[in-house]
Amino acid sequence: MFTEVLIGLVVGGIIFLVVLRRKSHVLKTEDGWWGVGPVPDDEQDTTTYPFKVTTSDAELEDLNRRIDQTRPVPSLEDSQFNYGFNSEYLEKVVSYWRNDFDWRRQVDKLNKYPHFKTNIEGIDVHYVHVKPKQIPDGTNAIPLIMVHGWPGSFYEFYGTIPLLTEPSERQSLVFEVVCPSIPGYGYSEAPHKKGFDSVCAARIFHKLMRRLGFQQFYAHGGDWGWLVTTNMAQLEPKTVKALHVNFAPPSKPGLTVTLSLLLGRHFPKLFGFTSVDLERLYPCLEKLFLESIKETGYMHIQATKPDTAGRALNDSPVGLAAYILEKFSTWTSQDFRNLVDGGLTRKFSLDDLLTNVMIYWTTGCIIPSMRFYKENFSRLDSPHVKIPVSVPTGFACFPNELMHTPKLWVQQKFHNLLTYTHMTRGGHFAAMEEPQLMVEDINNFIKKVEKMKAQ
Ligand SMILES: *[C@@H]1O[C@H](CO)[C@@H](O)[C@H](O)[C@H]1NC(C)=O
């Protein structure tokens, strides 16, 4: 009798510990309310309804008037993009915007895919939802949520959508894609209260996916989209079948990351560093440090006083374009800082770049988009920072990403890292810059996951 009780206790204890351990890896959250004023008593409207991007003569006249009133500033000789957006090139971009860019045509392009809105936690959440026209016999479309970052938008994914939903290659998977706008970005309403961070966005997107009838789905993200989808995986590891990201800076400089950075140059094997890792991590540490200071001023402003600088950007389309497009230059390739035109049109068209700017301009969302940084940095101790990610993860390592992340570092956070791909080309806005490569990697990764799940 005694031994049986003992065995029972031990087994119970082990089960308890296992459950506890597992539990501690699931992120907890509570419903929020981001609408104006207190939570209303009446039941919430959970309908989803179609939305179309529109414009008007008044909107365009107002824009043109403001563009015409811009006050050009000569840039310094030989400064290229090193002092920020080159002023002389800005005149060219602005002249294109004013005279050749056709917003009405771009609005039609935006409306090429079906848009919707639905109210969640008191704010209207916008999303693009594309179902495949054809699904091969005996297969199902694979649901995939794709989350953008700053200063981007859902539009970053427009090049990938056809490749995902109507692939021309027969061996490609066929996806059903949902691209939401983070609340405060583009056509999603901005939260009216303080505290809306990546975990809140993750919770809202789970509610969105549930509302759309998905019990399980895949997730992809870069920039803030990386953190939002990571939080989604932490909140509901059973709902997120697997996670694909192209950005994953270490969330805290833990012991392993610090040690590997200090010693990895001399003992690369110890940390699994490859020659690519060495090349990208060690131009020299001072340079790495200096670069990060040079390139993160925007972050400091946005994480502290977004409403001040943001107000100027919200009044000036030219200022807004300079602020946003400077990032599309430098974050695509740091070397582009040494080009007078910031290399902008080497990888993107001015039409696409200005469309993204127009999404910020017409919705007046620059301040709320900047506030996301403030909410992020106001809570350094958020539990999600400490919790690892258990769902299968794929990492696409693009050569010109802001910060190179060796496999070991990604594994510190993503305990089930299934694929880590060195991509041949591309920078921070990889989905927009290299849609084909991105979709290829998503395909390879998800095929691997599905194969594993089938076994
Ligand atoms: C804030 O953002 C950084 C990335 O910029 C991320 O590593 C960190 O985990 C975030 N912190 C919180 C509390 O969300």
Image (cartoon, rainbow, N blue to C red):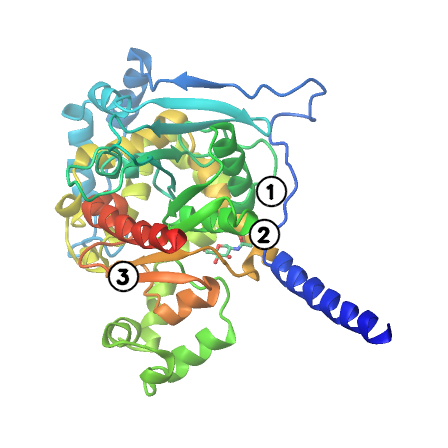
Residue identifier under label 1: 195
Residue at the image position 29 percent from the left and 52 percent from the top: 428
**Badge 2 local density, few (<14 within 10 Å), some, or many (20+)?**
few
Residue at the image position 43 percent from the left and 52 percent from the top: 299
* Amino acid type indicated by mark 2: Ser
Single out the mark in the foreground, 1 or 3.
Answer: 3
Residue identifier under label 3: 421
**Element at label 1:** loop
C-alpha separation, residue under disc 1 versus residue under disc 3? 35 Å
* Amino acid type indicated by mark 3: Thr
Horizontal and vertical percent for residue 431?
Answer: 27, 45
Who is closer to the viewer here, 26 or 227?
Answer: 26
Residue identifier under label 2: 378
- The answer to whether marks 1 and 3 mark residues whose Cβ atoms lie closer than 8 Å is no
Please identify the quarter of the rendering in which residue 62 is found.
top left
- The answer to whether marks 2 and 3 mark residues whose Cβ atoms lie closer than 8 Å is no
Who is closer to the viewer here, 339 or 195?
Answer: 195
C-alpha separation, residue under disc 2 versus residue under disc 1? 8 Å
Mark carried by residue 213: none
Who is closer to the viewer here, 455 or 286?
Answer: 455
Classify residue 192 as left or right of residue 443. right
